[in-house]
Image (cartoon, rainbow, N blue to C red):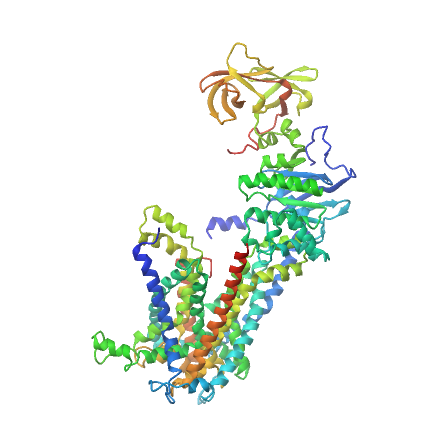
Amino acid sequence: MSAPAKEARAVEKVDLRSPEEIRAEKKKGRMGAWLILPGMLYMALFFAAPVVVLLSMSLFVKPEGAELGEFVPGWNFGTYAEVWNRYWPVLLRSFVFALIATVAALIIAFPMAYLVAVRLRGKPLLKGILLVLLIAPFFSSFILRTQAWKQILADEGWIVQTLKAVAILPADGSLTATPFAVICGLTYNFLPFMMLPIYASLERLDTRLLEASGDLYASPAQTFMKVTLPQSMPGVFAGTLLTFIPAAGDYVNAAILGNNRDTSMIGQVIDSRFFKVIDYPGAAALSFILMVCILILVLIYIRRFGTKDLF
Amino acid sequence: MSTTATHESSEFSPVSAGSGADLVLSGISKHFADFTAVQEMDLSIPSGTFIALLGPSGCGKTTTLRMIAGLEAPTSGTITIGGEDMTRLPSHKRPVNTVFQSYALFPHMSILDNVAFGLKQKRDKDAIAKAKAGLEMVELSHLASRKPAQLSGGQQQRVALARALVNRPRVLLLDEPLGALDMKLRRQMQVELKKIQMEVGLTFIHVTHDQEEAMTMADVVAVMNQGRIEQMGSPRELYELPRTAFVANFLGKSNLMEGAVVADAGPAIVVDVAGQRFELLKERAVATEGKIVVGVRPEKMRIAELDKPGFEHAGNQLVGTVTDASFTGVSTEYLVDVPGVGTVGTFTQNLGQDPARPGDKVRMSWEPEYTFGLGADEDLEAGVQAS
Amino acid sequence: MYNTKLGKWFIPVVGGLAFVYLLVPIVYIFVFSFNDGGKSNLQWRSFTLDNWKNPCGAPGACESLVNSLSVGAVATIIATVLGTAVAIGLVRYKFRFRSTADLLIILPLATPEVVLGASLLAQFLNLGWDLGYWTVIIAHVMFCMSFVIVTVRARVAGLDDRLEEAAADLYASPMQRFWKITFPMLIPGIVAAALLSFAMSFDDFIITNFNSGTFSTFPKFVYVAAARGIPAQANVIGSAMFIIALLVVIIGQVISYRRKKALAARG
């Protein structure tokens, strides 16, 4: 909001309504509060409070001679410095992987969404089937699917053999256990989250606009850049966020499709700090750093490209 | 403030309690947080009347309607129907039904279920039979099992009408119900609506911004402006004798000229407008002394080339130069520049003659009894609609 | 026409290929569900129907599936009821702390699962609650509710207020208005939100892994089994669930499509 607008709002206008009307309005507001109260209480208890607990846990101190997993409340900010110095390259890698996967998913999802939303207008049955195909894989478990990719791309699989035969891949090369495999897995897994919001905004696209643009001398490429893309921006915006955020924190793809050297992601580290190393403060601090970094990136993104539609 | 005084002969006087009036609004105001929609309105509508609330958008006509329907609570004032106070009664307990501008048909229900909705709510045992009869009345029985989305705009409009009418409300409210229809369908529906109203004999309150629609359908027209009723009466009364510049301009067109009363001639007064003397009946003037505004409807004027021999002119006359003539088939419209007065509009019926062309000097005249007089403080441009 | 020759085949081909990409692993899972692959099911050996005849043959597979279905159903019901109420409250009523409410809905969507899982675990450890069925449900309700609210809210915002006014005008009391007009019109949105919720709950691994203790869900079963080789029965269950989901929705669509067509034909 610009400064003058704020000032204008600051000048209280005289409310012309009768006290009764104002009371009725307030009563209505109270009823709305009752509707949202249970849900909001739930979110406060199981989202907001846990984040605070996590924050305090990240400051816990390991007492002298403590057993494994024993910590006492404290103010140990040193944990943050420690995990940051140790894991910032992993954090950076997580964001780079997530970014590449998001761009790749956008490139793949857009034609899908356009095909279903625009080209298949008037063919509700085919359209419906394709949309179901997008959601149904959830029920076959993404771990199973990721595992399937691992086996499809395995060294002894026909894809790698074929690539080696035509010398695209060197004789000792492989596809699994590489950053490439992890990024492919991320792209694959979050594709529906990219596609659905784009589909939703393209579905409202008025194809007469495209004809009008063509009529006004725009080439198909110009029409795409100047009409189609801007119209689908809310969807692209939501889709990129819904892909990037979970991808940055994901560890299943890195665990299944990666190696121990150059593919580990921050989620893996948090998981192993929690369950293998039993370093609760370290894991909590890393979680918190991840959350803050993502929020900062998301806020910058919203400032730059945001619409009010979703976030 | 009360409704502007109507013509003496009007049987529809503003609130006079107990005059057999069915719907009575007294002192109704509606303030929203930052503006006033309706101000101190008094309105009395006898049972069985077809009244049109006519005015530009934002004049408060829809808010008035919504207050009668109970969808909006008045800030002050009372609403009674047949003597019963309805002011604080919620919408679903009022004997009033509305035909909404957007029709507001329930998209998830069939046409028959839509029409039967109100009857079922009232636990009417014959709900379905009455709904079917209602559909028959609007000639849509064959579409009873369809969904609203499968109907054309005109058909939806008729369903909305049937849905409201089958409840036999004491008052039927119509919120610009024809606004979304094309011209031809509109005319057809206007005739049908009028016919149905005469058949069922209910009180109809029709909100519209279309003056032609208001005049062709309603027994009484109330012209609204800025939250007030400017004038109320039969369409002919309003047209022939507007009492404010807003009514003169909003309802048809008028030539309004500022002048001053210079003489009293018994039943009439003489007004000087830029050196021209006009006669005006006292009973047709809001003010009879000092500065006033003189008006005349364009079609009441005759026009001829200046000093055309043998042309019979009426008593009030103006001389000017034609600046524009547009031929519309049935008539020719002229804009004439009159020194000291401004542009005056007039038209002549197409009788095969061609009295003047742009650039010609002409004389225009009209009978003194067609002249009307308004108060001096009127804004001459009030209510002028962009064409 | 806006379709050029290039555009005519480009979009269907690329879009079609993307769908193929999406379905390749499903086909692989399906094919290998017929593999007589022994314990690890990594190499194709020979065709068998044994896995399909005995889907519960692998220890823990069916229990985990039942757990997943149960968690999915319970979490979906709770999240849908609470979330729908919130969505309606947020759109229809004005009140203070609105932006706080907005934040509580949006932030979980902008938080990676690993953080949601870790913070809930920290909370449960702090409260001293035993991890298991109910902690998983609590976690699932939390992340599903945000999706329900966002989905249903869009639907509520798209509702025409005038329909409720029309119902009020036709003698419907506020409660009747809600149940006869508003709610029926929200049903498609609520069903979509519930389906999405169920799918997300059923397929969730990360948050579940943090908050389940020894309680197993199907994704967790597969993840744990992956270390020693996933039994072919997991492929059978994965394929069967995929096919069931597909059939349920497609049959639903065909029925509604037929009904619409029949309706259109009647007039």
* Number of numbered callouts drawn: 0
In the image, residue A47 sits, relative to residue B29, either above or below, namely below
Q: Position of residue B305 (x, y in %)?
A: 50, 14
Q: Position of residue B297 (x, y in %)?
A: 58, 25
In the image, residue B287 sits, relative to residue A282, either above or below, namely above
Depth order, front residue of B220/C227: B220
Does residue B102 appear anywhere in the picture? no
Asked whether, in this view, residue B52 is left or right of residue A99, the answer is right
Asked whether, in this view, residue B217 is left or right of residue C192, the answer is right
Does residue B328 appear anywhere in the picture? yes
Where, quadrant-wise, is the N terminus of chain B in this rendering? top right
Q: Position of residue A266 (x, y in %)?
A: 38, 76
Depth order, front residue of C86/A24: C86
In the image, residue B201 sits, relative to residue A31, either above or below, namely above
In the image as oriented, which residue stretches furthest toward the right? B18
In the image as oriented, which residue stretches furthest toward the top? B309
Depth order, front residue of B257/B212: B212
Q: Which residue lies at the image location 54% right of the left edge and 39% below the top edge?
A: B184
Q: Which residue lies at the image location 36% right of the left edge and 70% below the top edge?
A: C20
Asked whether, in this view, residue A83 is left or right of residue A20, the answer is left
Q: Position of residue B34 (x, y in %)?
A: 59, 46
Q: Which residue lies at the image location 39% right of the left edge and 68% below the top edge?
A: A191
Asked whether, in this view, residue B18 is left or right of residue A97, the answer is right
